[in-house]
Image: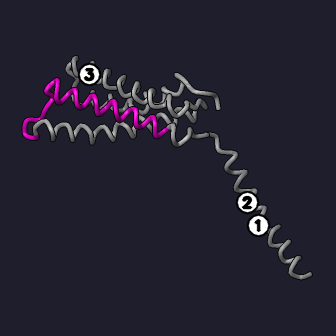
Amino acid sequence: MLRSNKAVNTDAQVRPRAVRASVLVRRLPLRWPSQMGLVWFAAGSYVAFVAASGTAVYTAKYVEHAWGKGGSFQLLCVLAVVATVLLTIGFGLGAAIIKRFPRARSSFAMGFAAAVFFVGVMWLLSIGHATPAESWLGVLLLPFIGGAMPALGGRDG
């Protein structure tokens, strides 16, 4: 009989802690998109950035001559990782704030479109002979572009 009372007391002591933790989780204001949605978005944007890098290096001859075409392409691919991370963070925050969650497969198209849009904006800035400071300000657009993408499609959460 003592054993059953101890078991009941132990259970009663453990349960309120678990309930309190779940209450805290329910009170968080943001709900994040699925991990696969974020992965597909990142994949789409990275593919677009690498395609744009290849086009810039091998077609438009945007090459640092000391490194050659291969080195220039590798550098642009590494910078594409940074741009992809910024876009994906913006996408996740945008989806959580407006509570619209695109499907995983449509996230790939959204990531591709966001990267193409950003490359187009930066290309237009380069035509206008933007200073390096203006170009870096353009990079600050990345999270905002990514954050606007869930508004284009998705289901309400």
Q: Main secondary structure of the magenta part?
A: helix
Residue pictured at 80% horizontal, 72% vertical: 10
Q: Which residue is mark 3?
A: 123
Task: Find numbered disc 2 in the image and state the secondary structure of the residue it sits on.
Answer: helix
Q: Which mark is residue 6?
A: none
Q: Is residue 84 left or right of residue 65?
A: right
Residue pictured at 32% horizontal, 28% vertical: 138
Position of residue 86 measured from the top left corner of the image (x, y, whole percent): 40, 38
Q: Are marks 2 and 1 in contact (CB under 8 Å)?
A: yes
The residue under label 3 is which amino acid type? Trp
Is 12 one of the magenta-colored residues? no
The residue carrying pointer 3 sits among few (fewer than 14), some (14 to 19) or many (20 or more) residues within 10 Å by Cα, namely some
Residue pictured at 79% horizontal, 68% vertical: 13
Q: Which residue is mark 1?
A: 14
In this rendering, the answer to whether 35 lies above or below 2 is above
- What span is in magenta? 38-67
The residue carrying pointer 1 sits among few (fewer than 14), some (14 to 19) or many (20 or more) residues within 10 Å by Cα, namely few
Compute the Cα span from label 2 to label 1. Answer: 7 Å
Residue pictured at 48% horizontal, 34% vertical: 91
Task: Find numbered disc 3 in the image and state the secondary structure of the residue it sits on.
Answer: helix
The residue under label 1 is which amino acid type? Val
Q: Which mark is residue 18?
A: 2
